[in-house]
Image: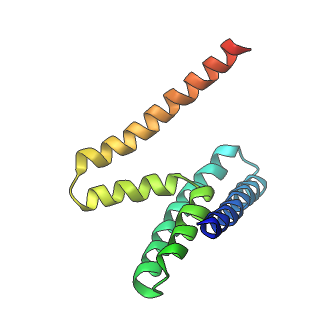
Amino acid sequence: MFQKLLWLSIAGACGTVSRFAVCELVAKAKNSHFILGTFTVNILGSFLFGLIYVLAQKKIHVAPDMRLILLTGFMGAFTTFSTLAFDSARLLKSSQYMMAFGNLFGQTALGVVALVGGVLLGRVLL
């Protein structure tokens, strides 16, 4: 178990550094706001999550622990948006449309509400 946690941590660190690098490259290349970098990471992350998932399961036959490390560790740190997209796509594939749209809308809207709530609480505590 310790070894799995260690590998997840290493993959997560690599995902975090990769996210930062991509955001920086996009910002410098386009001389843009941070939003374009985040947008790029989220879309690229979703694409890579799907690609890795299929290749690791169907083509390359990667062991379940390695899939966990790649998808949860690296991709989870690169962007959690990819996981939101993957979970929602699985719900759509299984014809659970209300759950899929509830997941997408709920996490997006409640995430913004929670962010604002955290900001407001932080201001009150200061």
Q: Is residue 38 above or below residue 78?
A: above
Give the x, y percent position of residue 78: 62, 58
Does 115 sit above or below residue 23? Answer: above
What x and y, as percent, mark residue 122? 67, 20
Residue most extreme to the front: 1
Q: Is residue 53 above or below residue 103?
A: below
Q: Residue at x 47, y 75 (%)?
A: 64
- In this orientation, which residue lies closer to the viewer: 68 or 59? 68
Front-most of 30 and 117? 117
Q: Residue furthest bottom?
A: 60
Residue 24 vs residue 37: left or right? right
The residue that appears at 45% across and 69% down in the rendered structure is 50
Q: Determine whether 104 is above or below 53 in the image.
A: above
Q: Quadrant of residue 4?
A: bottom right
At 66% across and 52% down in the image, what residue appears?
37
**Quadrant housing the N terminus:** bottom right
Q: Residue at x 24, y 44 (%)?
A: 98
